[in-house]
Amino acid sequence: MLNMQVFTSGKGRISRQTWWLAMIILYVIMAIPYGIVLWGSGNSRSASGAALPVMCISEIVIFVIVASIITVSVKRFHDLDKSGWYYLLALIPFVGGLIIFVYCGFIKGTTGPNKYGDDPTMPQELNDQFRTGESISTPVPQSNNKIWIIVAVVVGVVFCLPVLVISVLTLLGPNISHIFNNINSTL
């Protein structure tokens, strides 16, 4: 189900379950160097020269993990019969990451083989039957993607709204009392 090729090669397809598992593993691994750097910077007795190698190593680890996150998401887009270039949606501020999260985490991939490879949720004989056009004796399960899209949007809003509010308040920080004073004086 999960091998090193999932993290290193952008070819092929992976299922939602594999994507979720890979993301959890990658984010846990990425949290370790951050924790080490934070722990090292919080320790006042540590020499400042000792923090530099830890930071360099952690940056290398984080770069490798981010590259793996992109690779895993590209494979997930392949499962949806979309180009890996769809990952460039991440460049759209605020909503790009949410769009990728919804596509990769909640939308079922195409049934049967597509131009990127075999369906990872089907046995090989069913993929072969799809490819040759034979009649399929085993029913192929179908799912309703609409409910997952609604759930993903609700979860995204619940998690993103506080971050957006905090970001706006941080940007307005020093001026917020001035803004409220102006509003009160006009009323």
Image (cartoon, rainbow, N blue to C red):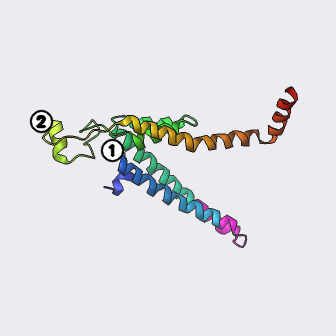
Query: Residue furthest toward the top?
Result: 186
Which residue type does callout 1 highlight? Answer: Lys
Tell me which corner region of the image, top left, top right, bottom left or bottom right, holds residue 24.
Answer: bottom left
According to the picture, the residue beneath numbered tag 2 turns out to be 135
The kind of residue tagged 2 is: Ser
Residue placed at 59% from the left, 65% from the top? Answer: 36
Magenta stretch encompasses residue 54: yes
Q: Which element is circle 1 on? A: loop
Furthest toward the front, the residue is 187
Tell me if residue 9 can be seen: no
Query: Residue at the spot x=40%, y=37% of the render?
Result: 147
Q: Which residues are magenta?
A: 40-56
- Quickly name the residue at label 1: 11
Between the residue at mark 2 and the residue at mark 1, the CA separation in whole angstroms equals 28 Å
22 w.r.t. 186: above or below = below
Question: Nearest the camera: 120 or 8?
Answer: 120
Predominant SS along the magenta part: helix
Q: Would residue 129 be seen by someone viewing this image from the given angle?
A: yes
Residue 40 in the figure: left or right of residue 156: right
Residue 89 picture location, percent across and down: 49, 35
